[in-house]
Image (spheres, rainbow, N blue to C red):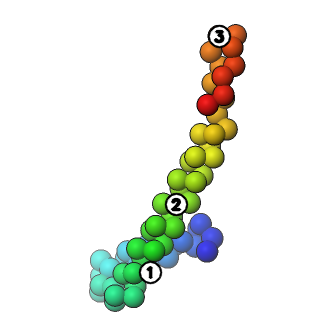
Amino acid sequence: MEFEKIIARINELSRKNKTVGLTDAETTERNELRQQYLNNFKRNFRQQLDNITVVDGEDEVKR
């Protein structure tokens, strides 16, 4: 599922939870989508950190 679709569905389920509540299946879906979101976030963040180059004086140090 695309990143934007995951966020949209999580938000939809959160709004529904605040108004009428969720079924057990919807609660499970929400938890699985939240885990997917966190895994995507962590992977993207790790990629950004891996691509950072630190320059200290005249020496260039990666990571």
Q: Label 3 vs label 1: CA separation? A: 50 Å
- In the image, what residue type sits under mark 3? Gly
| x then y, percent, for residue 18 | 30, 77
- In the image, what residue type sits under mark 2? Asn
Residue tagged by mark 1?
Answer: 29
**Looking at this view, is 29 or 19 the one in front?**
29
Q: Report the residue at 56% width, 48% height from top.
A: 45
Q: Specify whether residue 31 is in view.
A: yes
- The local crowd at label 1, few if under 14, some if 14 to 19, many if 20 or more residues have their Cα within 10 Å, is some
Q: Quadrant of residue 50?
A: top right
| x then y, percent, for residue 35 | 46, 67
- The local crowd at label 3, few if under 14, some if 14 to 19, many if 20 or more residues have their Cα within 10 Å, is few
Q: Label 2 vs label 3: CA separation? A: 36 Å
Q: Is residue 59 left or right of residue 36?
A: right
| x then y, percent, for residue 24 | 34, 87
2 or 1: tag closer to the N-terminus: 1
Residue tagged by mark 2?
Answer: 39
Q: Do the residues labelled 3 and 1 touch (CB within 8 Å)?
A: no
Q: Report the residue at 53% width, 56% height from top.
A: 41
Q: Report the residue at 69% width, 14% height from top.
A: 59
- The local crowd at label 2, few if under 14, some if 14 to 19, many if 20 or more residues have their Cα within 10 Å, is few
**Which SS class for mark 3?**
loop
- In the image, what residue type sits under mark 1? Glu
Q: Specify whether residue 16 is in view.
A: no
